[in-house]
Image (cartoon, coloured by chain):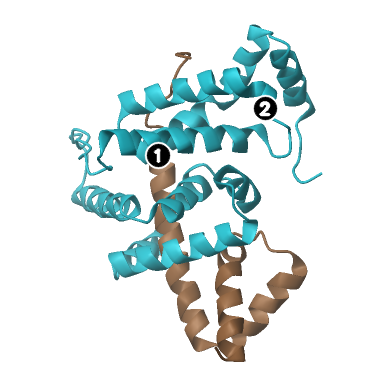
Amino acid sequence: MAFEEDPEERGWIERARSGDARAFEALVRMHQKPIYGLAMRMLRDHDDADDIAQRTFLRAWDHLHEFEGRCALRSWLFRICMNLCKNHHRDRARFVDVDVPPEPAEEAVGSDRIERETLLEKLREAVSTLPPKQRATVEMRIYQDLPFKEIAAALETTENSSKVSFHLAVKTLKAKLGNIARLLSDGEEASR
Amino acid sequence: MSANANACERIGVLMAEWISGELDVESSAEVRTHLATCDSCRMEEAEMRGVIALLESDATASSGVRDPGDAY
C-alpha cells in the first residue's frame, strides 16, 4: 500500500459513494479544517477561502465515484482545493497581493512582539511570491504538515520533485529574507 | 557537473527531512557524513534551519486564525 489508510475513513467513503449524505458529512468534518486552512493560506481572504472550501467538498461529493483510493483522501481533496484556488486566481486575474489588515494591537503587546509580527508578515509576503508549485509545496508541507508523499499526490507529481520544490522554495525564501531568518531563528534558540 | 556537486544536490533534496528528523537511518548517515566534509552544505543546512523554523513559527501563530465551523 502506498499510504497509510484509515479503515474508519474507508468505511465513510464507501457509504458516501453509495449516496449516504451523513457519511459524507462525517468526511467533511474530518477534513474541513485543513482544507479551509489551505484555501486561506493560498487566497488570504476568509470569504474566498470559505467559498473555495465549500466548492471543494461539493466537487468531491459529485466526483467521489472517481476517487480510486490510490492516495489518501486528504491528498485528493487538497488537489481539488489547489485546482480551485488556481482557477480562482485566474478568474480574478489577481494574486494574493491583498493586504491582510493587521490585528488590532493589544494593550500589553510589547515592541518585540510587534517587530516579530512585522518580520512574519515579510515572510508571508515572500511565500506569496514564490512560483505556484513551490508555494503550494511550502503551504502543504509547513502549514498543513503533510508528508512529501501526500504533497506529491496532491500536486500530481513525484515525491522527489516535491522535495526539490521545497528545497528551491526555502532557498528562494532565504534569498528574499536575507538575514532575517537567521536573526529570528537565533532569537528562538535563545528564548528556549 | 562534478561528482561533489551531484552529492551536494542530493543532500539538498534530503535536507528538509533531515532537519525534521524524518530520514531513515541510511539516508541520515549519508547526510551526516556529507555535512562533516562539506562547508557549503553545512552553511546551507544552518540557513535552511533558520527559514524552516521561521515558517513553522508562522504556522503555529496562524493555526488558530479561524475555525471554519460547520458551514459546509
- Camera sees residue A104: yes
Quarter of the image for residue A8 reads: top right
Answer yes or no: are tags 2 and 1 on the same subunit.
yes
Q: Residues within 10 Å of mark 1 (few under 14, many from 20)?
A: some
Q: In this orientation, which residue lies closer to the viewer: B33 or A107?
A: B33
Q: Colour of chain B?
A: brown
At label 2, the amino acid type is Glu
- Amino acid type at circle 1 is Lys
Position of A47 with respect to B69 (left or right) is: left
The residue that label 2 is drawn on is: A66
Please report the residue visible at 61 percent of the width from the left and 38 percent of the height from the top. A75
Q: Is residue A44 visible?
A: no
Count residues near mark 2 (Cα–Cα under 10 Å), then give few for <14, some for 14-19, many for 20+.
Answer: few
Q: Secondary structure at mark 1?
A: helix
The disc label shown at residue B31, or none: none
Disc 2 and disc 1: Cα gap in Å? 21 Å
Picture coordinates of residue B49, whole percent (x, y)? 47, 66
Q: Position of residue A99 (x, y in %)?
A: 20, 40
> Seen in the image, is B63 located left or right of residue A102?
right
Please state the chain letter of the residue tagged with numbered disc 2 in the rendered image: A
Residue A173 falls in which quadrant of the image?
bottom left
The residue under label 1 is A86
* Residue at the spot 38% in from the left edge and 22% down from the top edge: A51
**On-image quarter of the N terminus of chain B:** bottom right
Which residue lies at the image location 50% right of the left edge and 87% below the top edge?
B39
**Chain assigned cyan:** A
**Mark positioned earlier in the residue sequence (2 or 1):** 2
Please count the marks in the image.
2
Q: Residue furthest right?
A: A1
